[in-house]
Image (spheres, grey):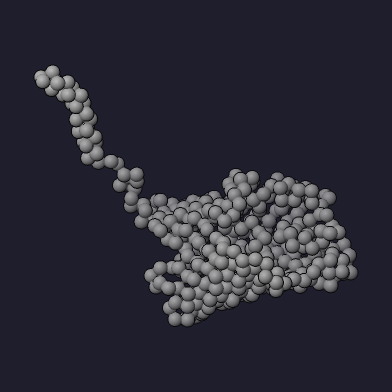
C-alpha cells in the first residue's frame, strides 16, 4: 500500500505542478496588442469602409442585356493624425484590378497613400500618392456617391504620386495648392505600345504641374475650385487642362457645375483614337475635349434626398489631316436621376434607386468615314450607399 502511494504520488505531482503553473500563467497580465501609451492616437484616426452595393440592370439601345448583384464600390480607408503636425491618409479600392506594373511602384488599386506635414501655421506639404487637384467637384466627391463619371474623369489617371504645397489665407476663404505629379501611372510603352505615331518618342520627364485655387464667398454659400494643369506626355508632346468647379448651397438645395477643357497633343483619353482606329492605326494627335457637368441635390424632409446629374462631352480631332472636314466627331450626353432614402438619423447609410442614361451622337463625318454608329446605354440600380465609419 505504501509503495502504491509513493507510485501515484510520483505520477500526479508533476501534473499538479503543471496545472498550478498553467493557472498562474493564466492569471498574469498580458500586454495589449496596442500599447496603452498609443491608444490616445486612435481618437484622431478614422477607419472607413466606403461601400456601394446594388442590384444592377443593364440596357443597350433600349434592350435589356442582363441583371445581377454587384459590389460597385468598396474602398478601405484609414486616415488621421499621428503627430501634432503630421497626418496621413490611405485608401485602397478592392473593386479595381491590382496592377503592380506602374511607374510609381504602387498598385493602381491604391487611390491615396500620403503624409501631410504642417510646415507653417497656414501651409502644408503633402508627399505620396494623392488625387490630382484638377477635376472640379465631380472628382472631389466621394466615389461611392458618383454612379457614373463624365468622359474626362472616367478616362484619366486621377490618383498619382507626387508632392503638393498648399497655403490658406488668414480668413481661410481662399486656399492655393501647387502640385508636381507623375503625368501617368503606366509606362509610355505600356500605355501606347505599337500605336505611337511616327516621330513621337518617350520623354525623360513625364510630369504634371497643377495650380489650384479654392474660394468661398457670400457666407460660404458659393464655393469654387479652379485649376490649370500642364502635362508632359512625350517629347515635345504636352497636354493643357482647365477645370472650373462651382458649388452653390441654399437651404435644402446644393448645386454643382463643372466646366472642363482638355487640349492634348497625344490623345490620352482614347475616345477619338477609338473612333478613327478603323483607318488610323495610331493614337490620334491634336485632340480636345470640352465638358459640362451639373449635379443638383435637394433634401425633402430629413430622410429623402432627390438628385439629378446632367453631363455632356464634345470630342474634337483638330489634327485631322483632311482640313476641310469638321473636327467635331462626337457629342455624348448623360442624365442620372436618383432618389435616396436615409432610414437612420444618426447613421450615414442610404438606400437608393438610380438610372444612368447615356447617349452618343456621332458627326456625319465620323459615321461616313469611320462607320461610327449612334447608341444609348442604361443602368437601373437598386442599392445601398454607406461610408461605414467603424473607428
- Quarter of the image where the N terminus is located: top left
Give residue 158's position: percent from left, percent from top. Answer: 61, 58
Give me the residue at 84% from left, 66% from top.
371
Residue that appears at 44% across and 68% down: 348
Relative horizontal placement of residue 335, taking residue 353 as reference (left or right): right
Left or right of 184 on screen, residue 198 = right
- Residue 362 shows up from this direction: yes
> Looking at the image, which residue is at 30% across and 47% down?
36
Q: Quadrant of residue 277?
A: bottom right
Residue most toward the front? 1
The image position of residue 126, as x and y in percent, is 52, 53
Q: Position of residue 236 (x, y in %)?
A: 76, 52
Residue 226: x and y in percent read 60, 67
**Vertical placement of 180 versus 339: above or below?**
above
Tell me where residue 289 sits by quadrant. bottom right
**Along the horizontal axis of the image, is 60 left or right of 148?**
right
Q: Nearer the viewer, residue 200 or 14?
A: 14
- The residue at the far top in this view is 3
Residue 258 visible, this angle: no
Q: Nearer the viewer, residue 16 or 59?
A: 16
Residue 204 or 356: which is nearer the viewer? Answer: 356
In the image, residue 308 sits, relative to residue 198, either above or below, namely below
Quarter of the image where the C terminus is located: bottom left
Q: Which residue is at a point 67% across and 49% down the rendered structure image?
A: 186
Count of number-bearing discs: 0
Using the image as rendered, state which of residue 342 and residue 16 is in the foreground: 16
Amino acid at each position: 500500500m505504501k509503495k502504491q502511494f509513493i507510485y501515484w504520488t510520483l505520477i500526479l505531482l508533476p501534473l499538479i505542478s503543471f496545472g498550478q503553473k498553467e493557472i498562474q500563467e493564466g492569471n498574469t497580465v498580458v500586454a495589449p496588442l496596442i500599447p496603452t501609451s498609443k491608444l490616445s492616437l486612435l481618437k484622431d484616426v478614422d477607419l472607413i469602409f466606403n461601400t456601394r452595393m446594388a442590384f444592377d440592370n443593364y440596357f443597350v439601345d433600349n434592350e435589356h442585356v442582363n441583371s445581377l448583384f454587384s459590389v460597385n464600390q468598396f474602398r478601405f480607408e484609414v486616415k488621421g493624425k499621428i503627430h501634432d503636425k503630421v497626418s496621413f491618409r490611405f485608401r485602397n479600392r478592392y473593386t479595381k484590378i491590382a496592377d503592380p506594373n506602374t511607374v510609381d511602384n504602387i498598385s493602381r488599386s491604391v487611390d491615396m497613400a500620403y503624409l501631410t506635414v504642417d510646415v507653417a501655421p497656414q501651409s502644408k506639404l503633402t508627399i505620396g500618392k494623392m488625387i490630382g487637384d484638377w477635376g472640379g467637384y465631380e472628382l472631389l466627391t466621394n466615389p461611392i456617391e458618383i454612379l457614373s463619371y463624365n468622359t474626362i474623369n472616367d478616362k484619366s489617371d486621377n490618383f498619382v504620386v507626387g508632392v503638393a504645397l498648399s497655403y490658406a489665407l488668414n480668413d481661410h476663404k481662399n486656399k492655393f495648392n501647387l502640385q508636381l505629379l507623375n503625368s501617368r501611372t503606366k509606362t509610355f510603352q505600356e500605355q501606347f505600345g505599337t500605336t505611337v505615331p511616327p516621330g513621337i518618342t518617350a520623354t525623360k520627364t513625364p510630369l504634371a504641374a497643377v495650380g489650384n485655387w479654392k474660394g468661398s464667398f457670400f457666407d460660404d454659400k458659393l464655393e469654387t475650385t479652379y485649376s490649370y494643369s500642364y502635362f508632359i506626355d512625350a517629347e515635345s508632346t504636352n497636354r493643357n487642362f482647365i477645370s472650373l468647379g462651382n458649388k452653390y448651397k441654399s437651404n435644402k438645395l446644393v448645386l454643382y457645375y463643372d466646366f472642363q477643357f482638355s487640349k492634348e497633343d497625344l490623345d490620352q483619353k482614347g475616345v477619338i483614337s477609338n473612333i478613327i482606329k478603323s483607318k488610323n492605326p495610331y493614337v490620334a494627335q491634336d485632340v480636345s475635349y470640352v465638358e459640362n457637368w451639373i449635379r443638383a441635390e435637394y433634401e425633402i424632409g430629413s430622410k429623402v434626398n432627390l438628385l439629378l446629374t446632367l453631363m455632356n462631352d464634345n470630342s474634337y480631332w483638330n489634327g485631322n489631316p483632311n482640313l476641310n472636314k469638321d473636327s467635331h466627331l462626337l457629342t455624348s450626353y448623360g442624365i442620372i436621376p436618383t432618389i435616396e432614402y436615409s432610414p437612420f438619423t444618426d447613421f450615414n447609410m442610404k438606400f437608393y434607386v438610380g438610372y444612368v442614361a447615356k447617349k452618343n451622337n456621332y458627326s456625319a463625318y465620323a459615321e461616313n468615314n469611320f462607320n461610327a454608329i449612334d447608341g444609348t446605354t442604361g443602368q437601373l440600380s437598386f442599392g445601398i450607399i454607406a461610408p461605414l465609419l467603424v473607428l
